[in-house]
Image (cartoon, rainbow, N blue to C red):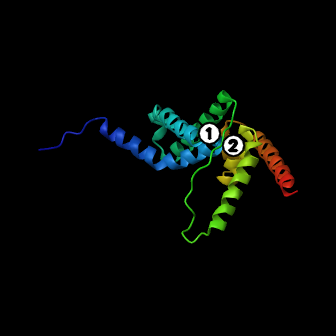
Amino acid sequence: MSEVIEPGLELAERQNRFVSEHLRRIFIQIYRIVGNVSDAQDLAQEAFIKALQHQEQLKDEQKAAHWLSRIATNTAIDFLRRSSRATFCEIDEAPESHSESPEQALLRSEHREYLEDGLRLLSPRERTALLLRDVEGLAAEEVAQHMSCSKATVRSHIANARTKMRRYMERRKR
C-alpha cells in the first residue's frame, strides 16, 4: 500500500529548511543594524514572513539567500526609520574559551562596549554599510544591492562611517 503524501508537505519542509539554514545569520545581520536583541528577533521573523510570501524567489538557493539578506537589511533600516531611534543592549556571551581569565573576559567586554559606543554615532545607513562591508566582508557592489542604492552612495556611507569612527577613537585615546 502506498503512502499518501499531503500536497503542501514538501513545500512546508522546504520552508522549514530555508528558515533553519538562514535564521542565525539573518538574526545576527539584523542585530548588528538595530543593536537590540528583542527587536532583532521580531525583525528576523518579519523578514522571513516577507520572504516566504514569495515562494517563486526561493527556488534558486544562492539567489534566495542573497534576496533574504536584502529583505533583512531593508526591514531593519525601515524599523530604525519608523522608530527614529537605535537602542543597544548587552548580549550575555559565554567566554570564548574555558581557559579565558576574568581579566580577559573583562577586556573583551570593554572592547565590545567601545565598538558599540562608536557604532551609535553612525546613522542607520552608515552603520549598515560599514557592518556589511567591514564585518560581513561583502563587496561594495553587494552592499549597494542590499541597501538598494548605488555603489557611490555605499562608498560615501562607508567613508563617513570610518571618519566618524576614527574621530571617536582619537577622542577616546585622550
Give the residue at mark 2. 128
Q: Amino acid at mark 1?
A: Thr
Residue 158 at x, y percent in the picture: 77, 46
Residue 114 at x, y percent in the picture: 74, 53
- 135, 111: nearer the viewer: 111
- 39, 26: nearer the viewer: 39
Can residue 137 be seen at all in this image of the molecule?
no
Q: Residue at x 62, y 32 (%)?
A: 79
Disc 1 + disc 2, Cβ < 8 Å: yes
In the rendering, which numbered label is found on residue 115?
none
Q: Residue furthest bottom?
A: 99
Residue 174 at x, y percent in the picture: 88, 56
Q: CA distance from mark 1 to mark 2?
A: 8 Å
- 47, 41: nearer the viewer: 41
Q: Residue furthest top?
A: 82
Q: Residue at x 62, y 35 (%)?
A: 74
Give the residue at mark 1. 73
Q: Residue furthest right?
A: 174
Q: Residue at x 70, y 57 (%)?
A: 110
Residue 122 at x, y percent in the picture: 76, 42
- Is 83 rendered above or below residue 100? above
Q: Residue at x 54, y 69 (%)?
A: 98
Q: Point out the tag, 1 or 2, that comes first from the N-terminus.
A: 1
Secondary structure category for the residue under label 2: helix
Left or right? Give the position of 129 relative to 54: right
Q: Amino acid at mark 2?
A: Thr
